[in-house]
Every structure is written in C-alpha cells, then in structure tokens.
C-alpha cells in the first residue's frame, strides 16, 4: 500500500475514535452556574461532583451517608454541587420541599435544611400539605422565620428549581439520584459502589 493510501486508511480508522471522544466530552450538555449556598467542599477542588436529587426520593435519602463519607474521604479534592430535580409525577411533595430548601438557601442555610429534609422524609412525604413540617424544619435550623414564610409563599423561587430540572432533562437525567463526576454519570446506588473509583480516576487525570 502506498503512503497516501496508508495515511487515508489510518484516518478512516481514527476518525470514529475521535468522534466518540468528542461526543463523550459534550454529550451530557452544560452545567449552569449554581449559587455558593448549594455547594460544599473545596471551591478550588480539582474534581466537581454534580448531584441531581429529589427530597422525596427514598434512594436519595439512602445515599446521603455515602455522599458525606466521600466528602470527608476526599476533603480538599472534591466539590459537590446540589441540583434540584423533583420528580413531580411520582412525588407530590418534592416540589414544595425543593421550594422550602431554596428559601433556606437564600438565608445561606441550605445544607442544614437539606439534611433535615432527608432525615424527616418519612414524616412529611405522605402529608397532603407538608408546609407545617417545613416550617418546623426552618425553626429547627434557626432560619429567620418571617423571611422564610414570605419566601415560601412566593412562587418566584420555583423558577430556580425549574431551571435545574430543565438542565437535568437536557443532560438526559431520568432518575434520582444521578451524579456526574466530571463527565462520568453514576445513577442511584452505583454511586455507592463505583463512586470512589470514579473520583480517584478523576483526581489522577
């Protein structure tokens, strides 16, 4: 085979590989900016973990100890961003819970409120109106109650929740919890089994 033909053949072999790599880098779509209140870990960490979660999702509550374990184990090396993805078709109180959490975020108390929502999930999830429970959590996490009540009565914060949900849909997220470690996607309990290896691989890159 002549050199020009050899080069042409090599290009045809390598082109699909390059195309696959390009798709991998862009296939999930962009991550929009998230406020500092919904981030934890080192803001300058090499590895960013993005979590799309639903406060009424039992699997999301179940995975929380693993998430906390990884944040401790890889302290200084990872940053976690929380994104709202309430599955409203199956979890009728997921959107109100996200609304309440966003109101807590606006007082820079997102993470304490987030933790209490998951810890008390079984008590507020079946309620027809969980507002009283959300107010109790707000008091327990030392929020400014008049500000919280005003925020929870205002539908405007829901725009932030809906923006995250749209981003999740655009990135082909269909279940909660879904985690992205760099460009790798881990769904549900796979994060518990494969999360450490995925994080360590991202740190080494």
Image (cartoon, rainbow, N blue to C red):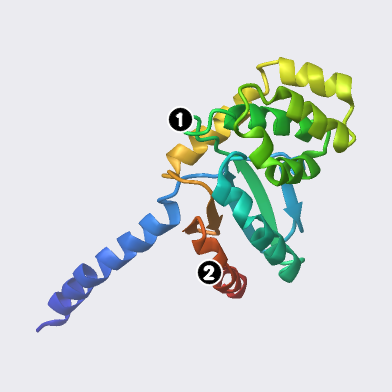
List the single residue furthest toward the left. Answer: 1
Q: Which mark is residue 112?
A: none
Q: How many marks?
A: 2
Identity of the residue drawn at 37% across and 63% down: 21
Please tell me whether residue 181 is drawn above or below residue 112 in the rendered image: below
Residue 13 shown left or right of residue 85 in the figure: left
Q: Which mark is residue 89?
A: 1
Pointer 2 residue: 193
The reply to whether dot 2 and dot 1 touch (C-beta < 8 Å) is no
Q: Earlier in the sequence, mark 2 or mark 1?
A: 1
**Considering depth in this image, is 112 or 41 the residue closer to the camera?**
112
The percent coordinates of residue 5 (x first, y second) are 13, 76
Identity of the residue drawn at 87% across and 24% down: 145
Tell me if I can see residue 27 in this picture: yes
Q: CA distance from mark 2 to mark 1?
A: 28 Å
Identity of the residue drawn at 66% across and 16% down: 155
The percent coordinates of residue 91 (x first, y second) are 52, 33
């Amino acid at each position: 085979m002549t050199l020009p033909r050899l080069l042409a053949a090599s290009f045809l072999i390598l082109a699909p590989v390059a195309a696959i790599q390009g798709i991998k880098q862009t296939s999930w779509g962009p991550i929009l900016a998230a406020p500092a209140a919904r981030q934890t870990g080192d803001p300058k960490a090499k590895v960013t973990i993005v979590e799309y979660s639903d406060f009424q999702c039992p699997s999301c509550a179940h995975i929380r100890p693993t998430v906390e374990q990884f944040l401790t184990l890889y302290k200084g090396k990872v940053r976690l961003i929380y994104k709202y993805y309430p599955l409203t078709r199956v979890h009728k109180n997921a959107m109100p819970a996200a609304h309440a959490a966003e109101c807590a975020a606006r007082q820079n108390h997102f993470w304490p409120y987030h933790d209490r929502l998951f810890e008390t999930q079984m008590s507020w999830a079946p309620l027809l109106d969980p507002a009283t429970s959300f107010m109790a959590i707000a008091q327990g996490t030392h929020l400014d109650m008049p500000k919280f009540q005003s925020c929870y009565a205002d539908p405007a914060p829901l725009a932030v929740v809906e923006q995250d949900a749209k981003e999740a849909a655009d990135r082909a997220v269909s279940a909660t919890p879904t985690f992205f470690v760099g460009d790798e996607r881990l769904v549900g309990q796979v994060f518990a089994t494969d999360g450490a290896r995925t994080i360590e691989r991202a740190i080494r890159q």
